[in-house]
Amino acid sequence: MRSLLILCAAAACATDTAAQTPSTATAERPVFEVASISRNVSGDLNASVRLEPGGQVVVTNNSLYNLIRNAWGTQRYEMVPGANVPNWIDTDRWDILAKVPAGTPPKQEQMPLRLRSLLEDRFKVVARQETREMPIYALVLARSDGRLGPQMKPSGDECAAAARAREAGVTPPPLPPDGFCGTRGGNGNVSMRGVPIANFVRNLGAATGRIVVDKTGLTGPFDLDLQWTPDPGGPGVAQAPDRGAQVDGTSLFAAMQEQLGLRLEAQRAPVQVLVIDSAERPTEN
């Protein structure tokens, strides 16, 4: 499936180094103490968002559209640009260096909220949640008897036991034979160990470009391995499959049924989306 040094030529970039005002720093609205923003005109295709020691966030070569996605914790297929939103939010690239206030614990969970405040203050982003009826895929069981495919099964206790051990601060027990818990994947393949079905659904949304709603009735964590031949014109896929992907033309939809015993059904349903109402380029000062 798929998934972020500020380098900039002085003559090509306008740098904005104004700090966010302390008056906006409330418990309900975490902010960065200072943030510098510059336009990235390198033409590089690589982009990153990194949290560094001390609570410093380094954004390199990201579009405002992708930064909004990170700040609001959503996916591209869950975002709807409003009629007045400029096209540059998905084409202009930005570098950002932001720091938390001195003495503030750099809590990972607060970083999206701080980024959201920065985008609202400096890019004048206005976004809101809204329910709309849209095309979706419903994930259902492919077989009437509910039997799963050969490459999907309920998880054992290894991953759950490892998580409990980490929380207790003790040495975790041995991992499953293939040596990992969580999700691994690339373009045309995904493997999961000890993962709830909801996590798999999120990955399917990224692969299909639609919101996927779980209607399987399955509960508990699962282990699965899925391989398919990526569609070169599909959402967010590269031109060549990663190692582990099918190369025989098996589509994602066919692979789901054959390997996992699951099926994606096209439907329409009311779903929550993030509507971007407006945005502006940051001012220089």
Image: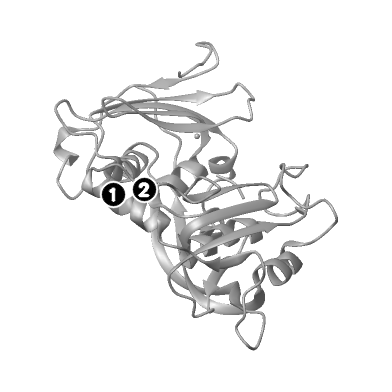
Q: At which x and y percent is residue 52?
A: 35, 26
Task: Give the residue drawn at x 45%, y 35%.
Answer: 281
| Residue indicated by mark 1 | 165
Task: Give the residue drawn at x 66%, y 49%.
Answer: 236
Q: Is residue 15 above or below residue 84?
A: above
The Cα–Cα distance between marks 2 and 1, rounded to whole angstroms, is 8 Å
Q: Residue furthest top?
A: 10
Q: Which residue type carries mark 2?
A: Pro
Camera-side residue of 85 and 164 = 164
Q: At which x and y percent is residue 108?
A: 30, 40
Camera-side residue of 196 and 230 = 196
Q: Which residue type carries mark 1?
A: Ala
Question: Closer to the N terminus: mark 2 or mark 1?
Answer: 1
Secondary structure category for the residue under label 1: helix
| Residue indicated by mark 2 | 173
Q: Residue furthest bottom?
A: 144
In which quadrant is the C terminus drawn?
top left
Q: Is residue 49 above or below residue 270?
A: above
Task: Examine the rendering and report whether any part of residue 197 can be seen.
Answer: yes
Q: At which x and y percent is residue 186?
A: 64, 45
